[in-house]
Amino acid sequence: MERLWAPWRSQFMADIARGKTFECIFCSRPDGGDKECFILWRGTHTFMLLNLYPYNPGHLMVAPYRHVTEYGDLTNEEFAEQQDALRRAIAALRSTTKPDGFNIGTNLGKAAGAGFPHLHTHLVPRWSGDANFMATVAEAKLVSESLETTYGKLKEALTKSI
C-alpha cells in the first residue's frame, strides 16, 4: 500500500493540540458576499457553498448558520432545510454537470471536519472513471473547471429552481 504524505498538516495538528483556535469558516463565510465566498444558496436556517478544495468540479457543502456539532443539536427546521438544500443541489448538479452519481457525507465533530466542528454535509458529484491515472501515476488530482465557472453554472441553476 502506498502512503500519501501531507507534512504541512503536522503544523496545523500541533497548533490544535496547543489549543490554538481557528475562525470557523461556516460561521464567518455567510457574512461575506455570495460571489466572493462562493455561496450558492441561502435559506432561512442553512446555506450552500462550494468547497474551495474540491475533490471534483461541483463539490459543495451545506451547513446550518447556527454553530452546531451534532445532528441532535439541529432543530427540526434546520434539519429539514438542510435535506431540502441537498435535494436542490443534486438537481442543480444533474442539470449542469450530468454526473453518474454522488457521494454524500456529513462531518460531525472537530476530527471529521478539517478542524472545524461545525456540522456540514459534503456533496461530491462523481463520473464513471473520474479516478483516473493522474491521481495514481502523476500524484495529482485534476479538477477540470474553475470554481468561478462552476459557481456561475450552479448559481444560475439554483436560482431557476426556487
Image (tube, rainbow, N blue to C red):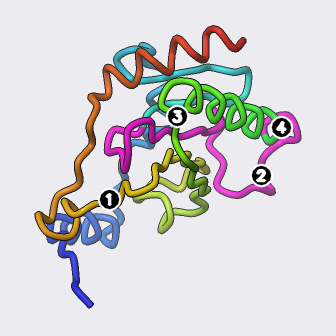
Label 1: how many Cα within 10 Å (few below 14, some 14–19, many 20+): few
Task: Bin the neighbour count of mark 4 within 10 Å (Cα to Cα): few under 14, some 14-19, many 20 and up.
Answer: few
Q: CA distance from mark 2 to mark 1?
A: 25 Å
Residues under labels 3 and 1: Cα distance?
A: 42 Å
Q: Quadrant of residue 17?
A: bottom left
From the top left corner, tell me how far across and down residue 80 is, in percent: 83, 37
Q: Which mark is residue 28?
A: none
Disc 2 packing (10 Å; few <14; some 14–19; many ≥20) = few
Specify the amino acid type for callout 2.
Answer: Asp
The residues tagged by marks 4 and 1 sit, at their Cα atoms, a distance apart of 34 Å
At x 41%, y 15%, the residue is: 152
Q: CA distance from mark 4 to mark 3?
A: 26 Å
The amino acid type found where label 4 is placed reads Ala
Q: Earlier in the sequence, mark 4 or mark 3?
A: 4
Question: Residue 3: where, in percent of width, then height?
Answer: 22, 83
Report helix, strand or loop for mark 1: loop
Residue where numbered disc 4 is placed: 80
The answer to whether residue 49 is above or below residue 109 is above
Magenta region, residue range: 51-78
Q: Earlier in the sequence, mark 4 or mark 2?
A: 2
